[in-house]
Image (cartoon, rainbow, N blue to C red):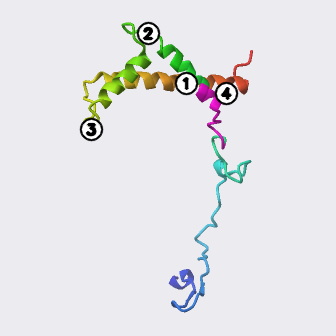
Amino acid sequence: MAATFATPSTVIGLGGSSVSTRPLSSSFLKPTLRANNPLRLAGASGGRFTCFERNWLRRDLNVVGFGLIGWLAPSSIPAINGKSLTGLFFESIGTELAHFPTPPALTSQFWLWLVTWHLGLFLCLTFGQIGFKGRTEDYFEK
């Protein structure tokens, strides 16, 4: 029985390049069937199935420009004790650069203005991307 599972093979050492093997065959082994995987269907992306479009970000510099302006305008309104969020953030950058090699302390107001200003900027850019691309691709139909 061991002879039926043995495969004849020819292996030649480092000097040659011939290796020949034959797959095992037996009445006990069923032929292998390949299951159809829906993720391996040949599609429009060169034979690969992808969940997202190739250009999923659909980057547009209009969104960056209008988003930055759309955040700088309201954050420059003097609403915090007569000062703007942008002004407070840039002022805290200046005070922290005054003692440059030393990093800002954890209790410094710089961290509050940094996180608040950037959080507002990223929210404005995200909603700008959603709104601008949603409108150009008719997501918001009447």
Which of pointers 3 and 2 lies earlier in the amino acid sequence? 2
Q: Is 61 contained in the magenta span?
A: yes
Amino acid type, mark 3: Pro
For label 4, the residue is: 133
Residues shaded magenta = 54-65
Distance between mark 1 and mark 2 Cα atoms? 18 Å
Amino acid type, mark 4: Lys
Crowd band around label 2 with a 10 angstrom C-alpha radius: few (<14), some (14–19), many (20+): some
Secondary structure of the residue carrying tag 4 is helix
Q: Is residue 54 left or right of residue 3?
A: right
Instruction: Evaluate if marks 3 and 2 touch, with contact meaning CB atoms under 8 Å apart.
Output: no
| Mark linked to residue 93 | none
Percent of width and height locating residue 47: 71, 54
| Mark linked to residue 68 | 1
Q: Give the quadrant of residue 109.
A: top left
For label 3, the residue is: 101
Crowd band around label 4 with a 10 angstrom C-alpha radius: few (<14), some (14–19), many (20+): some
For label 2, the residue is: 78
Secondary structure of the residue carrying tag 3 is loop
Crowd band around label 3 with a 10 angstrom C-alpha radius: few (<14), some (14–19), many (20+): few
Residue appearing at x 29%, y 29% in the figure: 98
Amino acid type, mark 1: Leu
Q: Give the quadrant of residue 101.
A: top left
Which of pointers 1 and 2 lies earlier in the amino acid sequence? 1
